[in-house]
């Protein structure tokens, strides 16, 4: 099978498209023919060495897959069934024609989605889902999502609206109208308006880190919750009365079933900025690292 791997940590030039033996599923795993693979910031962070694996080089790439089951397990999806799912971190194996994935990590592909759209959902969608669950987001709450037009952000704002929250989200000026279309109550052009002027919030979702996390503490009401994704909670900025935790996404096939139902009901839109061939994985990493992707990038196999 064709696969994108890397044999040392570094920039995108270390990525190689090679021929590798097909994986042999372990107990509880499916063999899936990958039709599309999502691209996430954790992918290039893994390639750079910020997210490390205990496996030897060469290492595989990516965690989002959409494809067709080619070998199954008792009680699992049928051979030939279309599925989507997320591989367990930190073992990347999505940028390849065949992958082994736990049966518990997949769900039926939403009927209304293309392969590329389906592959855009799992890691980012589950991250948003689990972040909102961790904060106890619900009806009547005021929720702020930083970078609401990004991969995680564009799912988070839609899930929060589905839960009945009042949603504010930041974006660049070019994406403000996009946030409107997603149903965001208060889209904020971060170059013009300081979201701190709109406080207090019940929940802030920090998808950016660094100074964004530092500023977010002061935007929360007493009893509010800060969820940070890209880095640990910075205790130097802690504010009394504000809860904070970092969420690291985990595979969850049942949650993907529920997300898929929302997608098929028309309650959630999946934004794919660009679909690139597997041969252009390096370009996809450059685009992702640039930090201006609306929704997701996807590799087609």
Image (tube, rainbow, N blue to C red):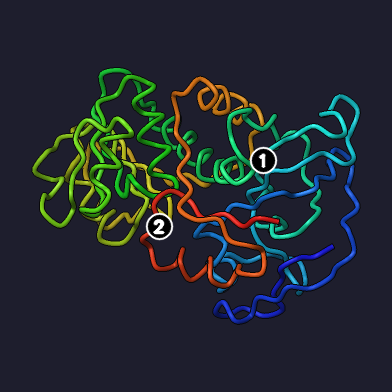
Q: Which mark is residue 85?
A: 1
Q: Which mark is in front, 1 or 2?
A: 2
Between 219 and 223, the residue placed more toward the observer is: 219
Picture quadrant where residue 75 is located: top right
Up/down of 188 relative to 260, above or below: below
Picture quadrant where residue 102 is located: top right
Q: Position of 145 compared to 222: left or right? A: right
Across the whole image, how many numbered discs are drawn on residues?
Answer: 2
Q: Position of residue 235 (x, y in %)?
A: 31, 54
Q: Are marks 1 and 2 in contact (CB under 8 Å)?
A: no
Report the Cα–Cα distance between label 1 and label 2: 22 Å
Q: Give the SS element for disc 2.
A: loop
Q: Residue at point 38% right, 22% down?
A: 162
Q: Position of 82 compared to 1: left or right? A: left
Q: Which mark is residue 123?
A: none
- How crowded is the residue under tag 2: few (<14 C-alpha within 10 Å), some, or many (20+)? some
Q: Give the SS element for disc 1.
A: strand
Q: Quadrant of the C terminus?
A: bottom right
- How crowded is the residue under tag 1: few (<14 C-alpha within 10 Å), some, or many (20+)? many
- Which label's residue is closer to the chain start, 1 or 2? 1
Up/down of 142 relative to 297, above or below: above
Q: Position of residue 202 (x, y in %)?
A: 25, 31
Q: Quadrant of the N terminus?
A: bottom right
Q: Residue at point 19% right, 35% down?
A: 186
Q: Residue at point 39% right, 50% down?
A: 150
Q: Residue at point 29% right, 53% down?
A: 213
Between 228 and 6, the residue placed more toward the observer is: 6
Q: Position of residue 283 (x, y in %)?
A: 53, 71
Q: Which mark is residue 293?
A: 2
Up/down of 233 relative to 251, above or below: below
């Amino acid at each position: 099978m064709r696969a994108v791997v890397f044999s040392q940590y570094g920039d995108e030039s270390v990525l190689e498209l090679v021929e590798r033996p097909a994986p042999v599923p372990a107990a509880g795993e499916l063999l899936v023919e990958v039709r599309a693979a999502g691209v996430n910031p954790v992918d290039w962070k893994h390639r750079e060495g910020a997210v490390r694996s205990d496996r030897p080089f060469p290492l595989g790439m990516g965690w989002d897959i959409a494809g067709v089951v080619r070998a199954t397990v008792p009680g699992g999806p049928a051979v030939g069934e279309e599925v989507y799912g997320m591989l367990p971190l930190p073992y990347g194996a999505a940028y390849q024609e065949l992958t082994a994935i736990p049966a518990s990590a997949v769900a039926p592909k939403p009927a209304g989605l293309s392969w590329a759209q389906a592959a855009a959902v799992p890691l980012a969608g589950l991250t948003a889902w689990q972040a909102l669950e961790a904060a106890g987001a619900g009806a009547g709450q005021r929720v702020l999502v930083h970078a609401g037009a990004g991969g995680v952000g564009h799912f988070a704002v839609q899930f929060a609206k589905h839960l009945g929250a009042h949603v504010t989200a930041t974006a660049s000026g070019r994406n403000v109208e996009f946030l409107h279309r997603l149903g965001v109550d208060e889209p904020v052009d971060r170059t013009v308006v300081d979201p701190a002027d709109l406080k207090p919030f019940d929940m802030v979702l920090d998808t950016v880190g660094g100074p964004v996390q530092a500023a977010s503490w002061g935007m929360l009401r007493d009893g509010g919750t800060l969820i940070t994704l890209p880095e640990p909670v910075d205790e130097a900025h802690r504010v009394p009365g504000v809860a904070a935790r970092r969420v690291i996404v985990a595979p969850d096939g049942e949650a993907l079933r529920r997300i898929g139902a929302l997608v098929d009901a028309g309650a959630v839109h999946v934004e794919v900025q660009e679909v690139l061939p597997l041969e252009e994985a390096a370009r996809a990493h450059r685009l992702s690292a640039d930090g201006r992707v609306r929704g997701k990038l996807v590799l087609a196999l």
